[in-house]
Image: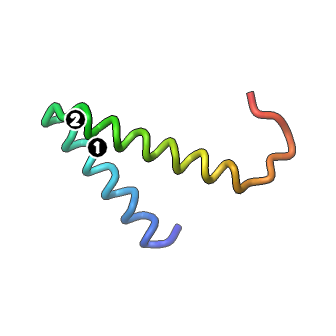
Amino acid sequence: MSNEIERFFELQDEATKAAFFENRGDELTDILVAALDDVWAILADKDLGETLH
């Protein structure tokens, strides 16, 4: 994994922890939704030969 990707995940982790500990639910929700959007984008780019359950 490149350093850029590793740093991206580190920043996401830090932002998530900060939002959680400071009880900022809206910001935490935004982070989680953005992460899910990233996952769907990655999955959409992959040619999945079999059905996932």
Look at the picture and state if 14 lies above or below 51: below
Residue at 62 percent of width and 53 percent of height: 42
Residue at which label 2 appears: 20
| Tag 1 near tag 2, CB within 8 Å | yes
In terms of depth relative to the viewer, which is nearer, 44 or 48?
44
Q: Secondary structure at mark 1?
A: helix
Q: CA distance from mark 1 to mark 2?
A: 6 Å
Across and down, in percent, residue 48 comes to 80, 47
Across and down, in percent, residue 3 comes to 43, 72
What label sits on residue 16 in the rendered view?
A: 1
Identity of the residue furthest to the top in this view: 53
Residue at 40 percent of width and 39 percent of height: 32
- Residue flagged by tag 2: what amino acid is it? Phe
Left/right of residue 8 with respect to residue 17 in the rendered view:
right
Residue at 34 percent of width and 52 percent of height: 12
Q: Secondary structure at mark 2?
A: helix
Look at the picture and state if 11 lies above or below 2: above
Quadrant into which the C terminus falls: top right
Left/right of residue 52 with respect to residue 39 in the rendered view:
right
Across and down, in percent, residue 18 comes to 19, 44
What label sits on residue 37 in the rendered view?
A: none
In terms of depth relative to the viewer, which is nearer, 32 or 1?
32
Identity of the residue furthest to the bottom in this view: 3
